[in-house]
């Protein structure tokens, strides 16, 4: 059986933590920032963990060796 290829687009967007969770960046930070409050924009800069409902599908299908 050949090696499984990692989806590079996913590998650039997610990082694996030491406990096996996936860290990701938040959306809505690129444009139309004038109407968003400073507090909201500051919180969008922080990274967050991926939801548990999609964690296994991302790890198995897109990052097979994670």
Image: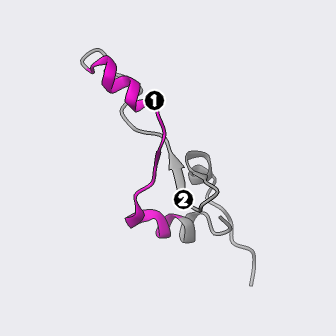
Q: Earlier in the sequence, mark 1 or mark 2?
A: 2
Q: Is residue 64 above or below residue 46?
A: below
Q: Kindly identify the residue that appears in the image at 49 percent across and 70 percent down.
A: 56
- Marks 2 and 1: in contact by CB < 8 Å? no
- Position of 60 with respect to 40 (left or right) is right
Q: Residues within 10 Å of mark 1 (few under 14, many from 20)?
A: few
How many numbered marks, from 0 up? 2
Element marked by disc 2: loop
- Most distant residue in the bottom direction: 1
Up the image or down, 56 lies above or below 12; here it is below
The alpha-carbon separation of the residues under discs 1 and 2 comes to 19 Å
Is 4 or 51 nearer to us in this picture? Answer: 51
Residue lying at 68% horizontally and 68% vertically, measured from the top left? 65
Which span is picked out in magenta? 36-58
- Please report the residue visible at 74 percent of the width from the left and 74 percent of the height from the top: 3
Horizontal and vertical percent position of residue 24: 50, 46
Q: On the image, numbered disc 1 is attached to which residue? A: 45
Q: Residue furthest front?
A: 19
Q: Which mark is residue 21?
A: 2
Q: Residue furthest top?
A: 34
């Amino acid at each position: 059986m050949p090696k499984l290829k990692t989806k590079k687009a996913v590998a650039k967007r997610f990082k694996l933590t030491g406990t096996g969770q996936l860290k990701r960046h938040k959306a809505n930070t690129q444009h139309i920032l004038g109407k968003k409050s400073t507090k909201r924009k500051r919180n969008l800069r922080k990274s967050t963990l991926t939801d548990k409902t999609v964690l296994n599908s991302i790890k198995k299908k897109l990052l097979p060796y994670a």
